[in-house]
């Protein structure tokens, strides 16, 4: 699965994207696996209220299932006008 990071999430993790193998059932499970990898992931995912997520380019919640997903993207909420 491709995992994409945008804006300050990318800055904290140090990667724009990566391919990972996971057995995570939901986005929240994936986040927990990532948090446990290294401190930089733990910092990036410390406050999920400051993040949005999309699965296969569809905006969703952290409890969304990952079965069959090809891509997960994490990014801060959009602002501006």
Image (spheres, rainbow, N blue to C red):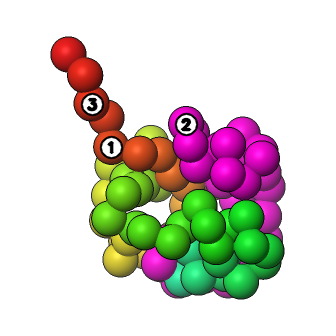
Residue located farthest toward the left when viewing the structure as drawn: 81
Question: Element under label 3?
Answer: loop
Q: Is residue 15 magenta?
A: yes
Marks 2 and 3 sit apart, C-alpha to C-alpha, by: 12 Å
Q: Which residue is mark 2?
A: 7
Question: Element under label 1?
Answer: loop
46 vs 55, nearest the viewer: 46
Residue located farthest toward the top when viewing the structure as drawn: 81
Residue 38: quadrant of the picture: bottom right
* 2 or 3: tag closer to the N-terminus: 2
Where's residue 25, x and y in %?
Answer: 53, 83
Q: Which mark is residue 79?
A: 3
Q: Is residue 41 above or below residue 12?
A: below
Residue 13: quadrant of the picture: bottom right
Circles 1, 2 touching at the beta carbon (< 8 Å): no
* Residue at image location 35% in from the left, 77% down from the top: 63
Q: Is residue 27 above or below residue 54?
A: below
* Residue at image location 67% in from the left, 43% down from the top: 11
The segment highlighted magenta reads 1-28
Number of other residues with Cα within 10 Å of mark 1, as a class: few under 14, some 14 to 19, many 20 or more:
few
Marks 1 and 3 sit apart, C-alpha to C-alpha, by: 6 Å
Circles 2, 3 touching at the beta carbon (< 8 Å): no
Circles 1, 3 touching at the beta carbon (< 8 Å): yes
Q: Which residue is mark 1?
A: 77
Q: Is residue 27 magenta?
A: yes
Residue 62: quadrant of the picture: bottom left
Where's residue 55, x and y in %?
Answer: 46, 54
């Amino acid at each position: 699965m491709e995992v994409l990071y945008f804006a300050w999430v990318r800055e904290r993790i140090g990667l724009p994207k990566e391919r990972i193998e996971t057995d995570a059932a939901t986005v929240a499970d994936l986040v927990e696996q990532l948090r446990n990898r290294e401190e930089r992931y733990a910092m990036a995912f410390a406050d999920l209220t400051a993040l949005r997520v999309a699965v296969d380019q569809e905006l969703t919640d952290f409890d969304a299932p990952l079965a069959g997903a090809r891509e997960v993207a994490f990014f801060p909420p959009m602002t501006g006008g």
